[in-house]
Image (spheres, rainbow, N blue to C red):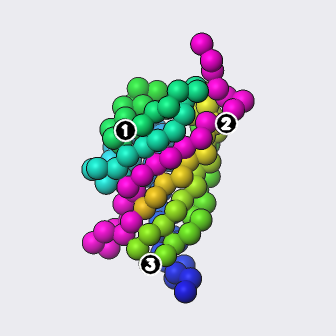
Amino acid sequence: MRSDMSEYEAVERAAQKFVDSVGSGDSTPAKELFYDEAVMFGYLDGKLEHGPIQNLYDNIDTVGADPGYRARIDVLCIEETVAIVRVLEDNWGGRIDFSDFLLLIKMDGEWKAVAKVYNQNSDTIRRD
């Protein structure tokens, strides 16, 4: 059974915290979204990044805001207590385009992200 439209809106609002963090260069909203033990995996400039979600917070706070940053949130699937969200990002840090996938679970009535997996678009990879 398809989830009620209000659940899609709730998941989108939760994912917006990630977008708000990257857009502002402040990890505070993302810390509201991600579960404390969340993890992230992906390749940044051809090198595998993985580990605790703190790595994402450090990246957000280090890179800072960019006025050219844009993002789109797509709620791909909701199954009662689990959701998958795709976030398309353009111009993170003035140069990188990402496709992110967030895995969320509903805990105590609140949507929390437990994992982030991402792809850096190949035309934005910097090879040193």
Neighbour tally class for label 1: few under 14, some 14-19, many 20 plus, Cα within 10 Å: few
- Kind of residue at disc 2: Asn
- Choose between 28 and 102: the one closer to the eye: 102
Neighbour tally class for label 3: few under 14, some 14-19, many 20 plus, Cα within 10 Å: few
119 is within the stretch colored magenta: yes
Image quarter where the N terminus lies is bottom right
Among the two numbered marks 2 and 3 on one chain, the one whose residue lies closer to the N terminus: 3
Residue 51 is labelled as 1
Instruction: Tell me if residue 94 comes above or below residue 78 in the rendering.
Output: above
Q: Which residue is mark 2?
A: 121
- Kind of residue at disc 1: Gly
Q: Which residue sits at x=43%, y=43%?
A: 40
Residue 125 is labelled as none
Residue 120, quarter of the rendered image? top right
Question: Residue 128 location, x and y as percent?
Answer: 60, 13
- Kind of residue at disc 3: Glu
- Choose between 57 and 120: the one closer to the eye: 120
Q: CA distance from mark 1 to mark 2?
A: 21 Å
Q: Which residue sits at x=64%, y=26%?
A: 125
Where are the magenta residues, as a range? 105-128
